[in-house]
Image (cartoon, rainbow, N blue to C red):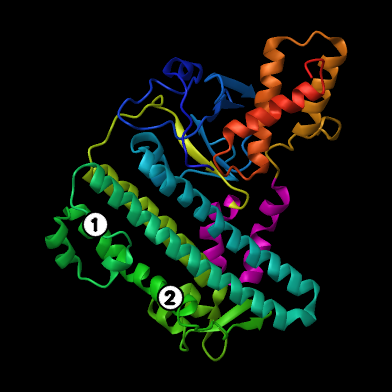
Amino acid sequence: MSSKPVEIPVEEFSKLPFLIGVPLDGRVIAATSYYQDKEPFFGMPNPSSGEMILMPNTTPTWGAYWSDEIIDKEQDTYFPLLDTLAQHFSFSQLLHPLRAIEVDLSNLASVIEKFIALHEYNVSRPRSDTAVRLMYLTEVEYLFGVCRSMIDLLHDCYRLLNTHFKGAALPETFGRFVDKEVADLARKYNLPNATQAYLLKVKPIFGTIRGVRDSIFHHGKSLERIFITEAGPGICIDSPPFDIFKHQLEANNDFVGQMQPNRIGSLFYLVVKLVDQMIEATDDLAKVLREVFPLPDRYTKEQYLYVSRGPSFLLLNQRRELLKQCWLAPAVRSVAPHLDARTHPLGRKTASDNVSQNTMLVLAKNSAAASGKDSEVDRERWIAENAYLRWINEQRGGDRSQQHWQDAEREYRCGTDEF
């Protein structure tokens, strides 16, 4: 998920069928993975030649793709904020927040899945209560860290666009906003009504999350009071540090009705609720950005969406059901059929055909070398796919596109007469 764009000749973009044109106002194409007639493709730019090479059957396992529909409604998710940024505001300075928000959404989903994994571990090893309690504790601490990261990233989206469209320079972090009244901020920075309404809605929960996170990471406070019950991890909503969420939790009748003796409520419910509120905040920000700032024309065809895929997004799609179940144990039972039926995007083949991409590439290269009939097109495609897999193996990070191509070319020559 590198946030550094690759430059190629404009005419090469005509190979991407989801485009209606190339933006010439400083925006970049946010992704080159796409589906056409439900078949996956990946546009791999060659940084050496500037050529856009289209690779079929390259299903994204984590990241985003363009499509006129959500391909896997169980595991793929449409986030209006990411679509708005990718379609309309993909200026170079917005690429980092866009990619980082994608990662944080995946991390939020992974926290929910780790709670499920910890519960199953605890059920299989009943004597692990103390260890599992500490594991839940560290996951909750991590959750607050991810939420704090997302809060600043959402602020970055607005702040950077406000600067881009010649508005007042805003503080670099949301923390400098959170302790001031919205009316004072509106006067100082000339904030539109839509922005004020957004801040009035998100400031209370953002401020609470920020306070808990800072008390953990900066002041050494602990979340020790987690209780292990048969229904899942519990918290006393009257005791610090979770009492700060007391009024919010008590507003839900299902939560109150399922509390255990001594005012012990479901920690899992609080976790999923915080994740849900962060996603709701991204949806609200998307509306604000579209209303407040001039909206550049989209560069994709009208029906295309920017769709996100993550290994645990299935659970984000099921978060309403998880909240309804409240406690972790019944929540695990409710989503178990979905988790058991989950398929790997590359694994929807028969067992005999389920060969890894790396294996298929090696076989293709050796066959071509043995026959001596490998065409230039075969050579270019092999190198492109090999470079792509190197990028995947490096977790889509770094700015080493040129090095990946050189390494792929070197590996090709080693297996052919070119060496």
Which quadrant of the figure contains the C terminus?
top right
Does 86 appear in magenta? Answer: no
Residue at x 58% of width, y 31% of height: 402
Range drawn in magenta: 313-342
Q: Which residue is mark 2?
A: 214
Which quadrant of the figure contains the N terminus?
top right
Query: Is residue 90 toward the left or the right of residue 415 in the image?
Result: left
For residue 355, the mark is none
- The one nearer the camera, 382 or 64, is 382
Cα gap from disc 2 to disc 1, whole angstroms:
22 Å
Q: Residue 323: x percent and y percent?
A: 52, 65
- The one nearer the camera, 50 or 225, is 50
- The one nearer the camera, 147 or 345, is 147
For residue 170, the mark is 1
Residue at x 15% of width, y 67% of height: 184
The answer to whether residue 249 is seen in the rendering is no
